[in-house]
Image: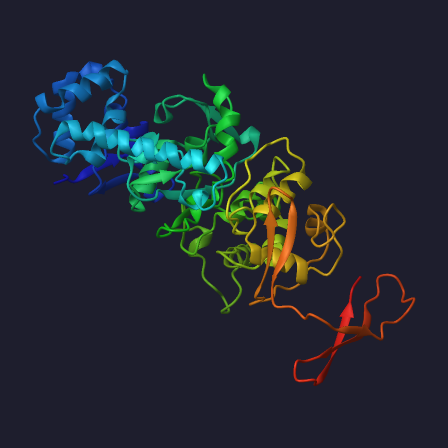
Amino acid sequence: MYVQAKLSAYTETGQAKLSIEVPKQRSYTGPRPVIPCSLADTPCATLGVRGVVNRLNATLGTSRTSHKLHTILEDFIERNYDFGTAYALLRPVWNTENSGNIQDELRRREEQDREHRQNALEGKPFAIPLLRPRRVWDLCSNHVVPSWIAYGRPTPISHAWVDEKDRADVLTPINGKEWPVPIPKDADLNLIRIEMLNLGAEYAWLDVLCLRQKGGPREDLHVEEWRLDVPTIGGVYKPVYEHEKAVVIYLNGLGRPLRLKDGDLDSNRNWFRRAWTLQEAGHQCIIASHMPDGPMHAQWIDGRNYETALLTRFHEELNSVPRGTNHIFATLAEMQKRVSTNLVDRVAGLAFPLRPYTIPAYHESESLEDAWTALVNAMDSEMRAHLLFVYPGVGLGCKKWRPTWDQVMKQPLPEDVDDLLAHVLHGDKTDEDWFYGYCIEKGHVQGFDVGSAEGRDQCGELVVKAADGIVHTFKIHVTH
C-alpha cells in the first residue's frame, strides 16, 4: 500500500513556498508514490542493492527482500542507473511475484514497442493509431522513460514555445541530460511536475522532454527519431483506440503564470496562433497555471462581455478552439490563421485532424506541396471526397481534382458538407485515384451560357432519365 507522499517547491528547487506565483506549483500531498529529485538523482551504485530495495519498499509500502532482486539490481548498477531510473522501471511491475518474471515482462514490453514502431515506419495501415509516444515523463520518479514501461496513456501537455530570447536550454537529469531542454527562463520543470501531480497525472508527455531536441551527445538520432515521432504527436493528444486524457494547456508559455497584457493575443508566439496546437486541444482541457486574479477567474459584466475588451477577446478565443472535428474545410481554415517556425509544420500539424490511415514521415526540408501531396494520399477516403466534390475550383497542381497546398492556405474555403457518402481511394503503387460511391450513369448537360465572363458562375441543367422512363431535370451551376 502506498504511503501518503509530499513534495514542496522548497525541497525541489530551494524557492520559498510563497514566492511561487502559481498555487498548484507550491506543494503536492497525495497518494502518488513520488520521490524527491535528490533521491531520484542518486546513483544506484551509491545506495547498493540493499539500499535500493530498502528505499523501494519505503516508497511503495512493501517488504520485499533484496536477494530476490539481486540480479536485476546488479544489472542496473552496472548500467550506471540512478535510483529514479530503477524506480521508474520497477514500480509498474513491482508486484510481480518472481523477480525473473520482472525481467521477462520488461523485455516483452520493449519488444512489443519495437515491433509497433517498425510497423509504423513501414507504413502499415492502423499501425500509427496504436503507436505510443517514444518516451513519457514519469512524474513519480521525475525521470523520462520509455513509454513501454507504463500502462495506459500519459497526460499530454500543450504549450507554445516562447521567443528564443525568453528561453534557456537546460541540461537536466530528468531526461538523463540526453539533450538540452528549451524552457522559458522563468519556468522550472520541478514546479511543472508538482502542478501536474496536483492535476492528478502519474505520467505526462511534454515535447521538450519526451521528443528529442537538437543538441546533446546523440544528435545523430535526431533526424531518425523525428521521421516517426513528429508526425505522430497528434496521437498523444487524441488517441484513437484508448480513452482520451484531458489535455493540460499552458496558454502563456510552459509553466508560466497565466496573465494577459496588451498585444499577447496578436503575438505569433501566442498559443492560439501556433500550427501545432491545432491538433492538441482535446474534448477535455485543463487550463494550467491560472492565478486567483487571472483571466480564468474573470466574471461577465453583462452576460456576454468582460471588464475589458482584452478579456472578452481572450474568452472568445478560448471558447472557439476546435476540439476535434471531422470537417476538413473548417480545419484548413483554422490552419490558415496559424504560423510555425518550419513552414512544413503547418502540413504535419494537420495529420491527425484529417484522419489518415497512416502518416507520412516527417522531413524538415520537404517542400510544402510534396508534404501536402503525401498527406492527401494518406488521408481518409471520405475526407478526399470532400476535396473532389465540395472544393469549388480546379486544382492547380499535378492533380486537377483536388486543390494544392497554396490554394487551401490562400484562397477562401467552402462550407463543409455532412454525410457525403462518397470516397476517393488512392493507389500508392500507381499514384492513381478513383471514386467509389453513388453515380449517375448517363445524363445530359445543357443550357450553359456561352462566353460567360471569367470568374463568373455558369448556370445550366442536368437532364436524367430514370429506370422507369421518367425524365428528371436538375438546376446546376459550375464555378469553373
Residue nearest the observer in this picture, 12 or 372:
372
Name the outermost residue toward the right.
Answer: 451
Residue nearest the observer in this picture, 196 or 441:
441
Left or right of 456 on screen, residue 365: left
Image position, residue 243 (x, y; %): 35, 52
Give the residue at x 29% y 46%: 200
Q: Quadrant of residue 68?
A: top left
Image position, residue 420 (x, y; %): 59, 66
Image position, residue 199 (x, y; %): 32, 46
Give the residue at x 36% y 39%: 204
Left or right of 236 on screen, residue 24: left
**Quadrant in the picture for the N terminus:** top left
In this rendering, the count of numbered labels is 0
Q: Answer whether residue 290 is visible to the viewer in this image.
A: no
Q: Answer whether residue 371 is visible to the viewer in this image.
A: yes
Left or right of 421 on screen, residue 42: left
Give the residue at x 62% y 53%: 332
Against 183, residue 311 (above or below) is below
**Quadrant in the picture for the C terminus:** bottom right
Residue nearest the observer in this picture, 2 or 434:
434
Color theme of the render? rainbow
Image position, residue 423 (x, y; %): 58, 59
Against 345, residue 41 (above or below) is above
